[in-house]
Amino acid sequence: MGEVRVRFAPSPTGPLHIGGARSALFNWLFARRHGGTMIVRMEDTDLNRSAEEYEAMILEALRWLGLDWDEGIGVGGPHAPYRQRERLDIYRPYIDRLLNEGKAYLCFCSEEELEAGRQELSARGELPRYLGKCRNLTAAACREKQAAGYRAAVRFRVPEGQLVVVNDLVRGRVEFESDGIGDFIIVKSDGIPTYNFAVVLDDAEMNVTHIIRGEEHLSNTPRQLLIYRALGFTVPQFAHISLILGEDRSKMSKRHGAVSVAQYRRLGYLPEALVNFLALLGWSPEGEREIFSVQELVQQFSLERVSKSPAVFNFDKLKWMNSHYLRQLPASELSALCLPHLAEAGLVEAEPSPQRLAWVERVVATAREHLEYAAQIPGLVQDFFGEEVTLDPQDTDAAEALRFETSPAVIARFREKALEFNEWDEETARETLKEVGKELGVKGKPLFMTVRVALTGKSHGRDLNTLLALLGPQLVARRLQHTLLLLQGLTG
């Protein structure tokens, strides 16, 4: 394979979502696999919806995912500028050339006239297309209309009776009849080129060799191929990757997980997990493995193994995959990832002291095996925070544990024992609880579950000795006192 040059060219009309991120990833993997060039540019000619803040969000999301680029915005390169709005002067000679060669023409039709044409075709059961009202206007007629103040768009003159063939690297041979396309606008009446025109000029000027993009762009491809031919450009190879569907095989929506990359980041997903997951949406590696490092993905990626069938977004698989990567993190990194969520929940300070931070790290470590994404952490470690105990009304085992005849005595005596310490470790806490059991002749559930429920209001949770050590004897004593008062209120 010769030099590979690919591009990711989003519109800055919103943050980077899952579909766009997957397209960027496939381009990046293909470029890295073949030692090629990855270009990032912006298609920002939608003047009403494009915004600098969205561009910044898209670029930040790409960087967070680890998808660096070799040429384009923020990097520079020989084909600058890399925003379409800054390339209007580059487009002008091509527009003039097509007009001069009769391959495009001025169109003065109003929106009302165009809508009437669409209605006429619809009534005949035909696909909407331009009926060609201005196709044969003379130069004199065009000058007359311009002099009268009419604004003109520029339409591409689609050759009649031709078969337009897309030899797609994923979908194979796809054929389109030119007669079903109709002459299409390449420059709007405000002078701004349309997507189908500008994208061809940009790809040709930047020597893009492979266009890897979503299946939804396949219908645009015949128009673009016609422009390539009209201007004598070398046609790149196309690869249209499948749609992403929800688990119910309907179009992706927020309920399926179709949110921005930034939202996944805020929830505490790791970039390695998201990249691993996205790579498997429509691409199948050899074998049954599902966990891949970025380096392994680069080594294995090929368009030959990209499926024509829609990819199904399995949210549970994403959470499972992220939990795998979370478990690989050092304790300090996992704690740092979880800290903002604990602070948002009001459980810890935004900037805790070093001593408090070390304690939080130990608390977070207790949830490592249960954590799917960092935003879950408050619910998983809430037993370690707060002075008071609230009984879970749905936990019948918890209520039973406090109804043992020995429960008040166990709670009171263990509280007295805890007050003898300023601090303790797991071993000391374990031995102290055993001493209480021996003194009172209590063991099993009446001892251990009673203390757990008295401390947390629940019959199940983290290892009891770990809980005792992390709470510390003074907080244990205060919680036990609160539960004793609660029991007195229930029996009073």
Image (cartoon, grey):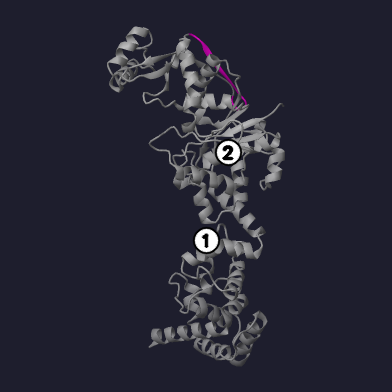
Q: What residue sits right under mark 2 in the picture?
A: 24
Q: Foreground: 162 or 458?
A: 162
Q: What residue sits right under mark 1 in the picture?
A: 376
Does 416 sit above or below residue 300? Answer: below
Classed neighbour count for the residue bearing mark 2: other residues with Cα under 10 Å, few (<14), some (14–19), many (≥20): many
Q: Amino acid at mark 2?
A: Ala
Question: Disc 1 to disc 2, how far (Cα)?
Answer: 28 Å
Image coordinates of residue 427 in percent, x first then y, are 67, 81
Which residue is painted at 62% across and 71% down in the image? 362
The reply to whether discs 1 and 2 touch (Cβ–Cβ < 8 Å) is no
Q: Amino acid at mark 1?
A: Gln
Image coordinates of residue 125 in percent, x first then y, are 36, 17
Magenta highlight on residue 150: no
Image coordinates of residue 331 in percent, x first then y, are 64, 65
Which residues, given as a range, are shown in magenta? Answer: 161-171
Residue 173: name its quadrant: top right
Magenta highlight on residue 163: yes
Q: Foreground: 432 or 441?
A: 432
Q: Does label 1 or label 2 sit earlier along the sequence?
A: 2
Does 105 sit above or below residue 194? Answer: above
